[in-house]
Image (cartoon, rainbow, N blue to C red):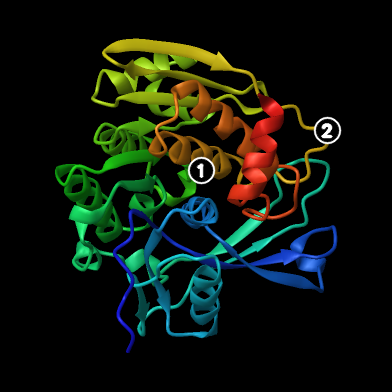
Amino acid sequence: MPPLSPSPEIIAFGEAMTMFVAEEAGALGHVEHFQRRIAGADTNVAIGLARLGFHVGWLSRVGDDSFGSFIRRALEAEGLDCRHLRTDAEHPTGLVFKELAQGGADPYVEYYRRGSAASHLAPTDADGIDFSSLRHVHATGIPPALSASSRELTEAMLDRARNAGASLSFDPNLRPSLWRSKTEMREVLNSLAARTHWVLPGLAEGRLLTGHDSPEAIADFYLERGAQAVIVKLGPEGSYYRGSLGGNQVDFTMPGVPVTKVVDTVGAGDGFAVGIISALLEGLSPREAVQRGNLIGALAVQVRGDMEGLPDRTHLDQLSSTLK
């Protein structure tokens, strides 16, 4: 067996699912033909960062089935380091079916993930990680919603990475249907967000989680609990940044990048996270980071698919030069 490459500098974790996207409009029950792809907010971010040249590791579980094999091949083809992707012989890979997006509206999706391999993630899945080599860990609110053991993994990942000196980002990615109650969802996700450096809620998410209406108040909620920066996604209007820079608090709103035609909004927030994380890891200013986040988020909504619009480095550099 050839030696493994150096340990990943970034790790993302969560559930990757095999997705079947309808090739024709209409309710899923009437669709005859589907295209197979992969789905998962956490994998979208991991793929986006890998396309920009980062060495990204993926931690998860898939079933010992054809769908799990497909996911592993697809992620490795995107350049992800899958040494921490475990094959679980006792539980299946999660599936999702998605209607064809129409008119820019969010397409209807159906999930088949109860009892999936990824829902059995646990802190022991992180035992093989070399935390001393990590620069960054990205987390979302999806793994802690899947199961108690997956929630414990999330907590362990954040605590061990932070203790090792890595930076941490957190996107709530609310999935209320996976939680027993909204109260539990708020308590758990706000506690996790407080352990990270960069918090990336959408405006509606921030309102639900904090009870505050304005981007400024939402940002202050997390800054008061330990976050270094909060970037609130405002949809087509852009995004709001508030955080510390050189000991001084900086806050501003960055207008969104105009989009002529919205095709599929799924994955826009993940593209935004790719822009923010990549830029901050490269040492760019908050304004440059938010501008990149807005740009990649805008790219994501112009194509059909969750991660198909995420750019590689050459494409990003070409587009960024037109904004200067």
Q: Quadrant of residue 270?
A: top right
The x, y position of residue 319, in whole percent, is: 69, 37
Residue drawn where x is 50% and y is 21% of the image: 287
Tell me the kind of residue under disc 2: Thr
Q: Is residue 148 left or right of residue 51?
A: left
Which element is circle 2 on? loop
Q: Quadrant of residue 235?
A: top right
Report if the CB atoms under discs 2 and 1 are less than 8 Å apart.
Answer: no
**57 lies above or below 64:** above
* Residue situated in front as seen by the camera: 21 or 323: 323
Q: Considering the image in quadrants, where does the C terminus appear? A: top right
The x, y position of residue 40, in whole percent, is: 52, 57
Res. 225 in view: yes
State the residue lying farthest toward the left: 163
The x, y position of residue 227, in whole percent, is: 29, 26
Q: Earlier in the sequence, mark 2 or mark 1?
A: 2
The x, y position of residue 149, in whole percent, is: 25, 60
The disc at residue 36 is: none
Which element is circle 1 on? helix
The disc at residue 260 is: 2
**Location of mark 1 (residue):** 274
Residue drawn where x is 49% and y is 51% of the image: 49
Res. 310 in view: no
State the residue lying farthest toward the bottom: 1
Tell me the kind of residue under disc 1: Val
Structural crowding at the residue carrying mark 1, measured as other residues with C-alpha within 10 Å and reported as few (<14), some (14–19) or many (≥20)? many
Residue drawn where x is 47% and y is 43% of the image: 176
* Residue situated in front as seen by the camera: 240 or 151: 240
**93 lies above or below 40:** below
